């Protein structure tokens, strides 16, 4: 994925300023920065979710496998099928069961037999590391699971439609530490099959799991590099200030 | 909304000179409390009176009051079987619900789910103004404009098309009794008018209910690559389901009690039959038409018993919908022309 | 957790199939149809009422009372007067009652009693208007043996009291608590704080609420029918039968004389103008208030 010249607004508020970013295939790219720097907005621009907010506007290019996601002929609905998203707060559909949640995206696409749906659902739940815990509770409402389980259910739901990219907007910030760890392990495992782009306010998390890190400040990308370099020998002073905890 | 919760007497007040505080405050507080009690007494009075009359009617007429079809107030041949009215009330309300709820939900979704448009505000205002139109004007228009159109075009059309369907078609057959006089109008058109009248309320409540659906749920569906229709189907409607049922009940309550417009177009027929196109009668309509000549106690208590039935059903509907929908919406049931809270907040200078 | 057997699945399509697109379009079209359907009645009614009503207006209409049935030259002056009297009495009774109840609920009400009152107000809000009329009919008209404008006012009060209470309570709650506390800190007794400070601050909101309640009261026919019966002669005595605008329209509409029907349209026009005027006026006041404080 490649972002070039991306600008985004909420009404008159210029939130992203001429952003450039790259994310390689099957890698984990982290976006870090203090709150309000625009990292959530950036990631939401990648699957065209930003424009769903009233008064939001985007200009620029987001290239996904060479094609511009924002090209006029592109249907945002298609984009979102191939670029999945997991949100900050787990949002399983409350009226659906665990299994129904997992296959919710699949049901949209078309005629899949019941057994195939179930198989794919199971596979997605396994990939999300949730199968073992819910296999006896597949018919229970999705909302009955614990926070960490719900989030993994959301990951499973996103994975079920086999996206090429998985966007994660601070997926563990609403979770307790052990669930956070689970999510991080999950990201490690997913790396082999999906490109992961993760926004996090937790620097250590980025250091732990990301191959590539992008640092943002005030709507601009300050520096983007191999994770190790960002944290040990950053090129920009602002980056250094942030990762050493002088602000943010 | 700032909750005014706290001790009844702030510490500041407690320190005020006792005599002055006690007198003025007690008078005022006592006075307003008295008035508030008055409201409760009013409700009890209404319920008490009507239920008393109702039970008296049952004592006098027995169960046949509800099941009998012979309603004859003429002294000497009196018989009070209220089934035609109960039937008519249920049928017209049912038609109203069947017609209004889908349109209301569609309208509510249009107003809340569609990307912001120039049409949103004007349309919302127009729908709310519909609620302000007095029912006599609905009746006037329906009687002189709708009834001829229905009689000449719509009813025959329905009789020829839907009327052919086995079993269900009986709903749309035009009974022979209609031809040859009698006031115009029938149950069907009364139902249609009711549908228009309850549209604003059901729409307003549904809008509120839909607006409460958390954004995250919508986003979850969108992120999976769902079209607008699919997003609504997956996240909005299931969540809002009970609220929509509540809105329906509010509409139903309103439809049950509507008197004037219905009285003008329902046809005043006492026969019960399968067709919707026959002259019918509803409880509020018969009360309005016959109260004047209710000279005898029996006739009077029969009418009041009908009012009792009406108020009990209406209250049950209100209670049920309150359970399903919650508090704020109740302001809408007053049938006011504007979404109360918005206007009042605006009047108070709060940003919308 | 890493023992994920990857079964071989057929690749999923990534496009949005035409079936889905069609369903989406159809659904959106359906929504728009609903919108159109909702607009039609208002437009139709307004058009007919304005068209037919305007034609029938005349000076006589406003100044004269109904003459000999079937003869031109009459009017419905008594209906206007009657409406003013009935609604006037209703306002004098219901507005203070409604506001006081609201004051109790918002300023003093805590605990089970206040919740009960609120609950009762909500229930009363859903009372069908004919029930209010029937109640007053049974209690006042039948007892006293006479239909009266006063009884009509009472019946309307039954309907309007909870509306004013509910709306006013909402408005009073919007008054910031700091205002009250600041005044109390100055040593002003609570009742003065409410009367002199809280209520005036909520003034515009209360006024709007009363306007809307008036609109409701003006438009109701059934309660007035059952209690005041109507009157073809001019009267200002509320203890006897009285006419009201909506009632007049109702009666005229069902008359067999075409002149009466014409009169009904004219009356409907006036009624519509007044009621919509109040409703729209309330909105305009609110909007202006909003603009002023921005």
Image (cartoon, grey):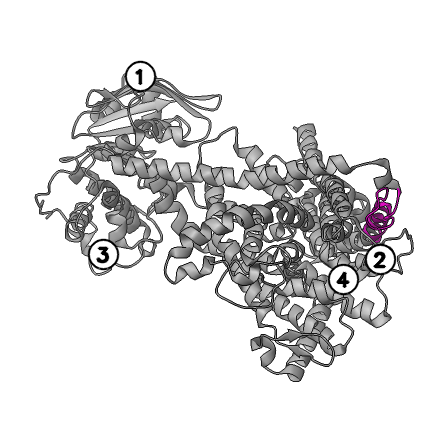
Which chain letter matches label 2?
C
Question: Which residue is disc 2 drawn over?
Answer: C149
* Label 3 element class: helix
Q: Who's the residue at 38% across and 29% down the image?
A: A50
Which chain letter matches label 3?
A
What distance separates the C-alpha of mark 4 from that of mark 1? 84 Å
Mark 2, residues whose alpha carbon is within 10 Å: few (<14), some, or many (≥20)? many
Whether residues under marks 3 and 2 lie with C-beta atoms below 8 angstroms apart, the answer is no
Question: Which residue is disc 3 drawn over?
Answer: A134
What distance separates the C-alpha of mark 4 from that of mark 3? 65 Å
- The image quadrant that residue C24 belongs to is top left
- The image quadrant that residue A78 belongs to is top left
Q: Is residue C70 visible?
A: yes
Residue C226: assigned label: 4
Residue A236: assigned label: 1
Residue A76: assigned label: none
Q: Are marks 4 and 2 on the same chain?
A: yes
Q: Which residues are magenta?
A: C64-89
Against B336, residue B119 (above or below) is above
**Magenta region includes residue C81:** yes
* Label 1 element class: loop
* Label 2 element class: helix
Q: Are marks 3 and 1 on the same chain?
A: yes
Q: Position of residue B34 (x, y in %)?
A: 78, 63
What distance separates the C-alpha of mark 4 from that of mark 2? 11 Å
């Amino acid at each position: 994925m490649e972002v070039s010249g991306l600008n985004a607004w909420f009404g008159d508020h210029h939130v992203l300023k001429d952003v450039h970013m790259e994310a390689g295939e099957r890698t984990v790219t982290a976006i870090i920065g203090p709150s309000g720097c625009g990292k959530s907005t950036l990631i939401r621009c990648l699957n065209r979710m930003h424009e769903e907010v009233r008064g939001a506007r985007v200009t620029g290019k987001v290239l996904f496998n060479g094609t511009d996601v924002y090209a006029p002929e592109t249907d945002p609905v298609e984009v979102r099928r191939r670029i999945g998203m997991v949100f900050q707060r787990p949002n399983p559909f409350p009226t659906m069961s665990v299994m129904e949640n997992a296959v919710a995206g699949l049901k949209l696409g078309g005629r899949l037999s019941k057994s195939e749906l179930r198989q794919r659902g199971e596979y997605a739940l396994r990939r999300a590391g949730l199968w073992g815990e819910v296999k006896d509770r597949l018919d229970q409402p999705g909302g009955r699971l614990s926070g960490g389980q719900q989030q993994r259910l959301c990951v499973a739901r996103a994975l079920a439609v086999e996206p090429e990219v998985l966007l994660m907007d601070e997926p563990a910030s609403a979770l307790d530490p052990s669930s956070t760890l689970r999510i991080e392990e999950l990201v490690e495992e997913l790396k082999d099959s999906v490109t992961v782009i993760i926004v996090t306010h937790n620097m250590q998390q980025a250091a732990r799991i990301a191959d590539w890190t992008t640092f943002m400040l005030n709507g601009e990308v300050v520096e983007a590099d191999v994770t190790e370099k960002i944290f040990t020998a950053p090129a920009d002073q602002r980056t250094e200030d942030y990762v050493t905890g002088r602000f943010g | 909304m700032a909750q005014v919760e706290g001790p009844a007497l702030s510490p500041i007040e407690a320190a005020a000179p006792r005599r002055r505080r006690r007198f003025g405050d007690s008078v005022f507080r006592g006075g307003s409390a008295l008035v508030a009690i008055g409201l409760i007494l009013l409700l009890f009075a209404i319920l008490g009176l009507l239920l008393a009359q109702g039970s008296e009617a049952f004592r006098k007429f027995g169960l046949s009051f509800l099941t009998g079809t012979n309603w004859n107030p003429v002294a000497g041949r009196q018989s009070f079987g209220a089934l035609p009215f109960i039937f008519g009330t249920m049928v017209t309300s049912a038609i109203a619900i069947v017609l209004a709820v889908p349109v209301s939900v569609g309208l509510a979704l249009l107003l809340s789910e569609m990307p912001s448009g120039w049409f949103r505000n004007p349309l919302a205002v127009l729908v709310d103004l519909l609620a302000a139109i007095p029912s006599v004007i609905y009746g006037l228009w329906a009687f002189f404009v709708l009834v001829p159109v229905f009689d000449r075009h719509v009813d025959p059309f329905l009789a020829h098309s839907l009327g052919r369907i086995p079993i269900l078609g009986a709903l749309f057959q035009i009974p022979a009794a209609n031809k040859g006089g009698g006031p115009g109008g029938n149950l069907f058109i009364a139902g249609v008018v009711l549908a228009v009248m309850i549209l604003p309320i059901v729409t307003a409540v549904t809008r509120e209910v839909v607006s409460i659906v958390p954004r995250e749920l919508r986003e979850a569906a969108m992120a999976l690559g769902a079209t607008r229709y699919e997003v609504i189907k997956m996240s909005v409607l299931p969540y809002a389901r009970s609220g929509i049922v509540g809105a329906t009940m509010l509409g139903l309550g309103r439809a049950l009690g509507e008197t004037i417009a219905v009285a003008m177009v329902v046809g005043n027929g006492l026969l019960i039959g399968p067709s919707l196109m026959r002259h019918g009668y509803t409880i509020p309509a018969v009360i309005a038409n016959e109260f004047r000549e209710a000279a005898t106690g029996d006739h009077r208590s029969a009418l009041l018993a009908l009012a009792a039935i009406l108020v009990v059903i209406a209250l049950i509907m209100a209670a049920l919908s309150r359970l399903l929908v919650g508090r704020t919406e109740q302001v809408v049931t007053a049938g006011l022309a504007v979404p109360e809270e918005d206007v009042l907040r605006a009047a108070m200078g709060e940003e919308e | 957790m890493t023992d994920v057997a990857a079964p071989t699945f057929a690749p999923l399509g990534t496009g949005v199939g035409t079936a889905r697109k069609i369903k989406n379009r159809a659904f959106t079209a359906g929504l728009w149809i609903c919108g159109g359907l909702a607009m039609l009645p208002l437009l139709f009614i307004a058009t007919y009422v304005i068209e037919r009503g305007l034609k029938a207006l005349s000076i006589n209409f406003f100044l004269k009372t109904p003459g000999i049935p079937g003869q031109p030259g009459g009017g419905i002056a008594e209906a206007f007067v009657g409406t003013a009297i009935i609604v006037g009495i209703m306002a004098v009774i219901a507005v203070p009652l409604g506001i006081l109840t609201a004051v109790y609920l918002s300023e003093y009400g805590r605990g089970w009693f206040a919740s009960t009152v609120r609950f009762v107000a909500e229930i009363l809000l859903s009372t069908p208007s004919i029930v209010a009329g029937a109640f007053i009919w049974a209690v006042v008209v039948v007892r006293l043996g006479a239909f009266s404008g006063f009884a009509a006012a009472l019946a309307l009060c039954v309907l309007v009291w909870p509306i004013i209470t509910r709306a006013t309570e909402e408005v009073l709650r919007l008054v910031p608590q700091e205002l009250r506390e600041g005044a109390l800190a100055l040593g002003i007794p609570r009742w003065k704080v409410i009367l002199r400070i809280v209520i005036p601050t909520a003034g515009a909101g209360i006024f709007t609420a009363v306007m809307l309640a008036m609109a409701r009261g003006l438009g109701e026919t059934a309660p007035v029918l059952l209690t005041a019966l109507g009157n073809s002669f001019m009267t200002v005595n509320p203890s006897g039968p009285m006419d009201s605008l909506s009632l007049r329209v109702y009666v005229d509409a069902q008359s067999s004389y075409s002149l009466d029907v014409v009169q009904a349209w004219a009356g409907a026009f006036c009624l519509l103008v007044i009621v919509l005027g109040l409703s729209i006026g309330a909105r305009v006041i609110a909007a202006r208030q909003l603009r002023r404080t921005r």
